[in-house]
Image (cartoon, rainbow, N blue to C red):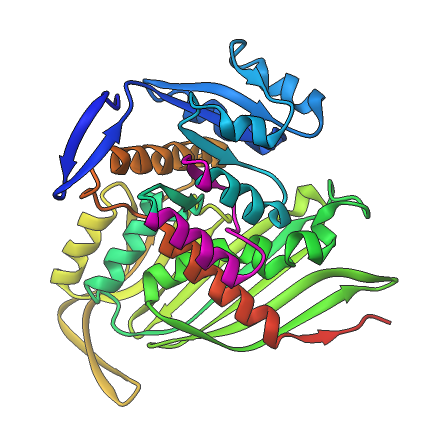
Amino acid sequence: MRIEKGTYFVGGEKTNMFDALNIAVIGAGGFAHFATSEFIQVPGVTLAGIYDENRENALRLKQIELKAKIFDTLDELCRDPSIDLVYIATPPFLHYAQSKKALLAGKHVICEKPAAITLPHALELKNIASDRKLLFVVNLMQRYNKLYDAVRKLIEHHVLGDFLHGFFENYASDEFLTEQHWFWDEDKSGGIFIEHGVHFFDMFSGWLGDAKVIAAQKSNRRGFKNVWDRVQASVQYSGGCVHFYHGFDQPKAMDRQEMRLLFEKGEITLYEWVPTRLKMTALCDDVNLKTLRSIFPKASIETIEGHDEDKVCHGRFKEIKYRYKIKLDTGGAVEKQVLYQELVTAMFKDQLTWLKDREHVRKITDLNAVDSLRLAEEAESVAIKLQGE
């Protein structure tokens, strides 16, 4: 795609466009290198500027576009009229001030999660962008996953009946998080709910709707008073409760994640924090089996039970009729890193499409940044602190 230069009337309003999109990166660490490498694959997009307090980081990122300018200060970058969009990949405590400076300078902003450490700051950024008709979005790329869409369709079509309960268990690695890393400093990270949990609060809200945190806990690491490495929260949705657990205490070789959603007529399990595989056990009739095949056209479906006529069972004081009990498996063909690249690229293209056509309906907007942070802040505020001995 290419964003063409000119003045367009979109939704009755004038909108300035670009003949090419020049992006600048603030915070040139490893993830910025990963994401920017994907962004510049989009035709018309150029890495034009880099700012990092550590010049060595900036020089490393410059290797993917030798013509990119390394700025000495953030102010200098924001004053440069050639920069159209800023991508921010710094620690969370810097997101608010850096995003605000870029937005006030007239730059579009894509920021890594979270939008800010506090909800009022996130709301302020949303309002600044809205007032100036600028892009402000946080890279909550989970909604671009085909498996995310598949689960959403399952729920919308009521294939498995009502939702009852769910959980997300995140046994994450801390192997490269030294004791001095900013991640453990909650004044800089916001804590695990805010720094990391927003991805999953957003994901489950997309499936299940509005939510409220009803309980939460956080535990610190024995012998390290200020290292809060495990958090959990119970979140109530209209259909049922989801329990979230995040622990950053595993070696990389044991890093693993699992999500499960239980319904009246079946359950689904997704694997990896960016889900790469889905398994399901379900009761279904001919109509629902056909729907499952349309949602998961490449999945294997094994019939555990098959009946020539309806079989009747009961649950939740209801009569449930089914013809088949099946197991469905999408398989493990998707490699996580490749999928992650696809999701980051899809998020970026979605936002650029909106810059060209403001009537385009995006999968994530500034509302996702605000709503996910609202739940994360709720969880942090009600969390009972469990001190290690």
Q: Residue at x 35, y 41 (%)?
A: 134
Residue 14 in view here: yes
Residue 175 figure quarter: top right
Q: Is residue 151 above or below residue 19?
A: below
How many discs appear?
Answer: 0
Q: Position of residue 84 (x, y in %)?
A: 40, 27
At 79% from the left and 73% from the top, the residue drawn is 387
Residue 65 is covered by the magenta coloring: no
On screen, residue 162 above or below 297: below
Of 1 and 203, the residue lying toward us: 1
Is residue 279 something that shows in the picture?
Answer: no
Q: In this view, does 141 lie to the left or right of 52?
A: left
**8 to the left or right of 86:** left
Residue 360 in percent (x, y) is at 20, 42
Magenta stretch encompasses residue 107: yes
Residue at the far bottom: name it.
317
254 relative to 239 in the view: left or right:
right
Q: In the rendering, at what x and y percent does residue 120 appear?
A: 50, 62
Q: What stretch is highlighted in magenta?
A: 104-131
Which residue is rendered at x = 36% and y = 56% of the image? 367
User: Residue 26, position in %: x, y?
Assistant: 57, 32
User: If the image is split into quadrants, where does the N terminus sit?
Assistant: top left
Q: In which quarter of the image is the C terminus?
A: bottom right
